[in-house]
Amino acid sequence: MYAGRTNTPCCLCGSEHTVSRFEIAPRAVTLMKNSGPIAWRDIVGAVTLSFCESDWELVSELALEMDMHPLSRCNVAYASFSLREDFEALLSAKKDEPDQTKQETKLLDRSRDVIDSTDDPYTEDRDRVEAIVIGLSLEELGVIEAAPHRKQRPPSSAD
Ligand SMILES: [Zn+2]
Protein backbone atom coordinates (compact mmCIF):
# COMPACT_ATOMS: atom_id res chain seq x y z
CA MET A 1 0.00 0.00 0.00
CA TYR A 2 1.05 3.56 -0.62
CA ALA A 3 2.66 4.67 2.63
CA GLY A 4 2.36 8.43 2.24
CA ARG A 5 3.89 10.41 5.04
CA THR A 6 5.60 8.24 7.62
CA ASN A 7 5.48 10.60 10.58
CA THR A 8 2.09 12.15 11.05
CA PRO A 9 2.36 15.12 13.42
CA CYS A 10 -0.25 16.15 15.97
CA CYS A 11 -3.05 17.65 13.90
CA LEU A 12 -3.71 20.32 16.53
CA CYS A 13 -0.23 21.66 17.26
CA GLY A 14 2.09 19.98 14.73
CA SER A 15 4.23 18.25 17.37
CA GLU A 16 6.07 15.15 16.15
CA HIS A 17 5.57 13.41 19.48
CA THR A 18 2.17 11.80 19.18
CA VAL A 19 0.63 9.31 21.58
CA SER A 20 -2.68 8.42 19.99
CA ARG A 21 -4.56 8.50 16.72
CA PHE A 22 -7.93 7.72 15.22
CA GLU A 23 -9.59 7.50 11.85
CA ILE A 24 -12.32 9.63 10.36
CA ALA A 25 -14.28 9.42 7.13
CA PRO A 26 -12.84 11.34 4.15
CA ARG A 27 -15.97 13.53 4.01
CA ALA A 28 -15.22 14.73 7.55
CA VAL A 29 -12.07 16.40 6.22
CA THR A 30 -14.37 19.20 5.04
CA LEU A 31 -14.93 20.12 8.70
CA MET A 32 -11.19 20.63 9.24
CA LYS A 33 -9.03 23.73 9.07
CA ASN A 34 -7.53 24.48 5.61
CA SER A 35 -9.58 21.76 3.92
CA GLY A 36 -10.61 24.00 1.01
CA PRO A 37 -8.34 22.55 -1.72
CA ILE A 38 -8.77 18.90 -0.68
CA ALA A 39 -10.87 16.76 -3.04
CA TRP A 40 -12.29 14.53 -0.32
CA ARG A 41 -14.05 12.29 -2.82
CA ASP A 42 -10.64 11.24 -4.14
CA ILE A 43 -9.34 10.15 -0.74
CA VAL A 44 -8.73 6.39 -0.70
CA GLY A 45 -9.42 4.70 2.66
CA ALA A 46 -9.87 6.47 5.96
CA VAL A 47 -8.12 9.63 7.14
CA THR A 48 -5.86 9.29 10.19
CA LEU A 49 -5.45 12.07 12.73
CA SER A 50 -2.66 11.89 15.33
CA PHE A 51 -2.42 13.73 18.64
CA CYS A 52 0.30 14.65 21.12
CA GLU A 53 -0.19 13.82 24.77
CA SER A 54 -1.73 17.09 25.95
CA ASP A 55 -3.95 17.47 22.89
CA TRP A 56 -5.11 13.87 23.23
CA GLU A 57 -6.29 14.69 26.76
CA LEU A 58 -8.16 17.68 25.39
CA VAL A 59 -9.72 15.71 22.53
CA SER A 60 -10.77 12.87 24.86
CA GLU A 61 -12.38 15.35 27.23
CA LEU A 62 -14.20 17.07 24.37
CA ALA A 63 -15.59 13.79 23.04
CA LEU A 64 -16.27 11.84 26.23
CA GLU A 65 -17.41 14.64 28.51
CA MET A 66 -18.70 17.42 26.27
CA ASP A 67 -20.00 15.40 23.34
CA MET A 68 -18.02 17.44 20.79
CA HIS A 69 -15.51 16.69 18.04
CA PRO A 70 -12.27 18.66 17.58
CA LEU A 71 -12.20 18.73 13.78
CA SER A 72 -12.65 22.46 13.23
CA ARG A 73 -9.38 22.99 15.17
CA CYS A 74 -7.46 20.22 13.38
CA ASN A 75 -5.21 21.20 10.49
CA VAL A 76 -5.81 19.09 7.41
CA ALA A 77 -2.15 19.60 6.46
CA TYR A 78 -1.26 17.37 9.43
CA ALA A 79 -3.74 14.62 8.57
CA SER A 80 -2.60 11.36 6.99
CA PHE A 81 -4.46 10.06 3.94
CA SER A 82 -3.92 8.85 0.39
CA LEU A 83 -5.38 10.36 -2.74
CA ARG A 84 -6.49 8.39 -5.76
CA GLU A 85 -3.78 10.08 -7.85
CA ASP A 86 -1.10 8.67 -5.54
CA PHE A 87 -2.28 5.16 -6.30
CA GLU A 88 -2.51 5.91 -9.99
CA ALA A 89 1.05 7.18 -10.02
CA LEU A 90 2.15 4.07 -8.21
CA LEU A 91 0.22 1.57 -10.29
CA SER A 92 0.37 3.61 -13.51
CA ALA A 93 -3.27 2.77 -14.03
CA LYS A 94 -6.57 4.59 -13.62
CA LYS A 95 -8.40 3.80 -10.43
CA ASP A 96 -12.15 4.07 -9.96
CA GLU A 97 -13.49 6.84 -7.78
CA PRO A 98 -13.37 5.57 -4.18
CA ASP A 99 -16.72 4.42 -2.77
CA GLN A 100 -17.18 6.91 0.07
CA THR A 101 -20.52 5.49 1.16
CA LYS A 102 -18.94 2.09 1.64
CA GLN A 103 -16.10 3.64 3.64
CA GLU A 104 -18.53 5.61 5.83
CA THR A 105 -20.66 2.52 6.42
CA LYS A 106 -17.58 0.59 7.49
CA LEU A 107 -16.51 3.29 9.96
CA LEU A 108 -20.04 3.68 11.32
CA ASP A 109 -20.43 -0.07 11.79
CA ARG A 110 -17.21 -0.11 13.77
CA SER A 111 -18.39 2.89 15.83
CA ARG A 112 -21.72 1.20 16.59
CA ASP A 113 -19.90 -1.90 17.82
CA VAL A 114 -17.81 0.25 20.17
CA ILE A 115 -20.85 2.20 21.44
CA ASP A 116 -22.76 -1.04 21.99
CA SER A 117 -19.93 -2.41 24.13
CA THR A 118 -19.15 0.87 25.84
CA ASP A 119 -19.66 -0.65 29.31
CA ASP A 120 -17.30 -3.49 28.51
CA PRO A 121 -14.11 -3.07 30.60
CA TYR A 122 -12.07 -4.00 27.52
CA THR A 123 -13.43 -1.11 25.49
CA GLU A 124 -10.71 1.52 25.41
CA ASP A 125 -11.26 5.25 25.72
CA ARG A 126 -9.43 5.69 22.43
CA ASP A 127 -12.04 3.56 20.66
CA ARG A 128 -14.84 5.47 22.35
CA VAL A 129 -13.34 8.81 21.31
CA GLU A 130 -12.98 7.61 17.72
CA ALA A 131 -16.55 6.28 17.63
CA ILE A 132 -17.95 9.56 18.98
CA VAL A 133 -15.94 11.73 16.57
CA ILE A 134 -16.92 9.60 13.55
CA GLY A 135 -20.58 9.71 14.60
CA LEU A 136 -20.69 13.43 15.41
CA SER A 137 -18.90 14.46 12.21
CA LEU A 138 -21.15 12.38 9.94
CA GLU A 139 -24.20 13.66 11.82
CA GLU A 140 -23.03 17.26 11.30
CA LEU A 141 -22.56 16.56 7.58
CA GLY A 142 -26.05 15.11 7.29
CA VAL A 143 -24.87 11.62 6.33
CA ILE A 144 -26.72 10.12 9.29
CA GLU A 145 -29.61 11.42 11.36
CA ALA A 146 -27.95 10.91 14.73
CA ALA A 147 -24.54 9.76 15.91
CA PRO A 148 -24.65 6.15 17.18
CA HIS A 149 -23.90 7.18 20.76
CA ARG A 150 -26.79 9.69 20.75
CA LYS A 151 -29.32 7.28 19.38
CA GLN A 152 -31.57 5.42 21.76
CA ARG A 153 -31.28 1.72 21.29
CA PRO A 154 -34.52 0.41 19.79
CA PRO A 155 -36.69 -1.37 22.35
CA SER A 156 -36.32 -5.08 22.03
CA SER A 157 -39.50 -6.77 20.89
CA ALA A 158 -38.34 -10.04 22.38
CA ASP A 159 -39.22 -9.05 25.94
ZN1 LIG B 1 -0.54 18.58 19.86
Image (cartoon, grey):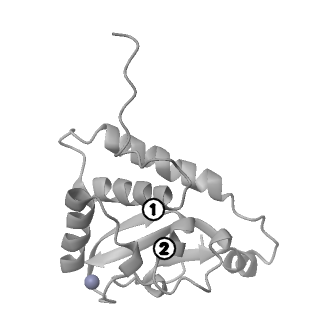
Mark 1, residues whose alpha carbon is within 10 Å: few (<14), some, or many (≥20)? Answer: many
Secondary structure at badge 2 equals: helix
Instruction: Name the residue nearer the viewer: 1 or 13.
Output: 13
Query: In the picture, which quadrant includes the C terminus?
Result: top left
| Disc 2 residue lies near ligand 1 with CB under 8 A | no
Q: Residue at x 33, y 83 (%)?
A: 12
Where ligand 1 lies, by image quadrant? bottom left
Q: Is mark 1 within 8 Å of ligand 1?
A: no
> Which residue appears at 59% of the width and 75% of the height?
82
**How busy is the neighbourhood of tag 2: few (under 14 within 10 Å), some, or many (20 plus)?**
many
Q: Is residue 150 left or right of residue 97?
A: left
- State yes or no: discs 1 and 2 in contact (Cβ < 8 Å): yes
Q: Which residue is mark 2?
A: 31
Amino acid type assigned to the residue bearing label 1 in the image: Ser
> Considering only order in the chain, which callout, 2 or 1, is on the residue closer to the N terminus?
2
Q: Quadrant of residue 54?
A: bottom left
In the rendering, at what x and y percent does residue 13 appear? Answer: 30, 88
The circle drawn on residue 120 is none
Q: Which residue is mark 1?
A: 137
Quadrant placement of the N terminus: bottom right
Classify 52 as above or below 113.
Answer: below
Amino acid type shown at disc 2 = Leu
Residue 113, relative to residue 83: is it above or below? above
Whether residue 92 sits left or right of residue 54 in the image: it is: right
Residue pushed farthest top? 159
